[in-house]
Amino acid sequence: MKGHPLQGRDFLKLLDFSTEEILGLVDLAAELKQKKKEGIVHDVYRGRNIALIFEKTSTRTRCSFEVAAHDLGMGTTYLNPTDSQIGKKESIRDTARVLSGMFDAIEYRGYGQEIVEELAKYADVPVYNGLTNEFHPTQMLADLLTIKEHFGRVSGLKFVYLGDARYNTGNSLMVACAKTGMHFTACAPKAYWPESELVEECKKLALEHGGSISFTEDVREGTRDADVISTDVWVSMGEPDEVWEERIRDLSPYRVDRSVMENAGSDAIFLHCLPSFHDLGTGIGRKIHEKFGLTEMEVTDEVFESEQSLVFQEAENRMHTIKAVLYATL
Ligand code: CP
Ligand code: NVA
């Protein structure tokens, strides 16, 4: 779309965007979703191409970028964690310049945030963060859209995140809430709270936008009257298997179960970026069951499958929101 205010911008973290820009992308995603539901073809970017670099595995993010790009008429090239030269035989800086010559945009999922920032620095085309250790900004747009679809608004709601709040999802949710005037509470052992520099920045933003940021180790106090309850896996991609034992010990009291949802209230919704360990339907879930005896981890199957759980609407919204990012920035 010519002339969109975000044309040419990278999408690396929500901190780079104003509240209006973030909520504008959410509204744009809602429009694009409506168009798709009505069967309106919207292939305005025919002839353009995007490179999708995944140094970590993915279902939702990859499929969202591919479907969104195809719906917009674009071509996609998927570079998997093992088959390209990136990082091993070719620097990020050189990769950025090579891909800029062939593609109109680049998506990157991988490890440190500094890698995607470097890619963006040397690329001449928009670069999108498909998840780093620190941030998962496209996920945030999907969460905001899901919240807005359900409550009709975002600002003023109480959002509670339970579990490892120091990693990509916890960090990003705190930023998303701070930017949009939600009241964010991380409910976790102190060692799992986000780093203080980011917390201070978010507290300032929250104040500006009428929200708040708080932390507690007390599940009942933290989740009382929450509008949104959210969690994520206890061990993230790229972390060593050895950390499972301490995570299970430290985070089991923060599992989202029926009592958490009851404490929040019957109008609360449950969100999870997925994938989730809520039963024994996964290889890792079964391994953990054999070793530690757990049948469910960060969320019980009962909550996951309940009426209050909007996780599949949230997953679908990944595609519509990623489409909004492509549409706005190209
Ligand atoms: N939520 C999310 O990013 O899912 P994938 O890892 O499947 O992309
Ligand atoms: N924290 C998780 C998010 C997955 C979408 C991870 O990094 O593995």
Image (spheres, rainbow, N blue to C red):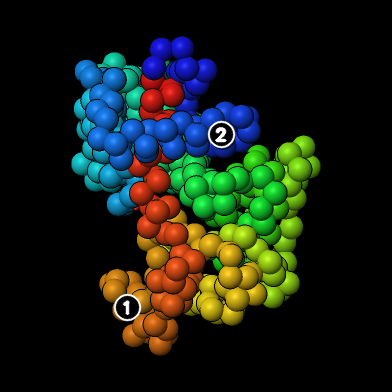
187 and 96: which is toward the camera: 187
Distance between the alpha carbons at the discs numbered 2 and 1:
37 Å
In the rendered structure, which disc, 2 or 1, sits on the residue that comes first in sequence? 2
**How dense is the environment of label 2, judged by Cα within 10 Å: few (below 14), some, or many (20 and up)?**
many
Q: Is residue 60 left or right of residue 223?
A: left
Is residue 35 shown above or below 121? below
Q: Position of residue 328 (x, y in %)?
A: 43, 24
Q: Quadrant of the C terminus?
A: top left
Q: Which kind of residue does numbered mark 1 sit on?
A: Leu
Please name the residue shown 34% across and 85% down the image: 290
Mark 2 residue element:
helix
Is residue 54 shown above or below 92? below
Please name the residue shown 60% across and 45% down the image: 153
Q: Which kind of residue does numbered mark 2 sit on?
A: Ile
Q: Quadrant of the N terminus?
A: top left
Q: Is residue 123 left or right of residue 280?
A: right
Residue 196, visible in the rendered structure: no
226 and 322: which is toward the camera: 226
Is residue 148 shown above or below 255? above
Quickly name the residue at label 1: 280
Please name the residue shown 56% across and 34% down the image: 22
- For label 1, being within 8 Å of ligand 1 is answered no
Quickly name the residue at label 2: 22
Q: Position of residue 254 (x, y in %)?
A: 58, 73
Q: Residue furthest top?
A: 3
245 and 76: which is toward the camera: 76
